[in-house]
Image: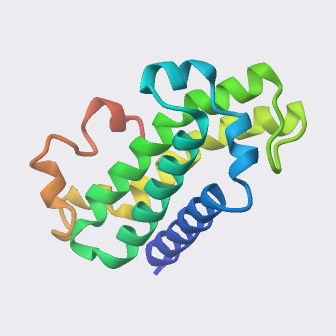
Amino acid sequence: MPRTVARLALAALLIAAGAAHLTVLRRGYRIVVPDWATRVLRTDKDMIVVASGAVELMLGAGLVALPRERARIGAAIAAFFIAVFPGNVHQWRTRRSAPGLDTDARRLARLFLQPLLVAWALWAGGLDRDRPGHGDEANAIVGHGISRETPAFGCLSW
């Protein structure tokens, strides 16, 4: 039951954030996109915000609508949170305000929230269920080389 609540809450967070990226907070998110990201991705800041919002919507919806793919989607959400982390660092370093992140303290705290979001995504997706006695829902992801014993995830204690 706690995992189901965590999964639904994470899905709701992603869907709300995705919708905000596409609507009311779109301009605020453009402010924090690093200039180097536009050069690397060969696009403008608005397109990066729109794309990230669309990804958040799809991941949030997929986490709820595709129960057989939960572990993979949880891992994809964790990867997404890792991928956007440089933008969070950029926002803190440049002291650029965004909705809800208008002080240095809040921007710094946001950096420490990111690892928790990664762990939340992995746990809510059921990535730890590859352990003996935890069912077969997430075993498909083990075949792709991702498991609790994978070095990147081995530091997490479930």
Q: Does residue 149 sit above or below 27 in this rendering?
A: above
Q: Position of residue 143 (x, y in %)?
A: 9, 49
Residue sitting at 67 percent across and 24 percent down?
Answer: 90
Q: Nearer the viewer, residue 95 or 79?
A: 95
Residue sitting at 74 percent across and 61 percent down?
Answer: 24
Q: Does residue 69 sit above or below 49 in this rendering?
A: below
Residue sitting at 66 percent across and 61 percent down?
Answer: 20
* Residue 49 in the figure: left or right of residue 133: right
Q: How is the image coloured?
A: rainbow
Q: Nearer the viewer, residue 57 or 106?
A: 57
**Total numbered labels:** 0
Q: Position of residue 77 (x, y in %)?
A: 42, 52
**Outermost bottom residue:** 1
Q: Position of residue 64 (x, y in %)?
A: 39, 76
Residue sitting at 33 percent across and 36 percent down?
Answer: 154
* Residue 137 in the figure: left or right of residue 19: left
**Outermost left residue:** 143
Q: Residue 25: in sight, yes or no?
A: yes
Q: Does residue 31 sit above or below 69 in this rendering?
A: above
Quadrant housing residue 44? top right
Quadrant housing residue 132? bottom left
Q: Residue 157: in sight, yes or no?
A: no
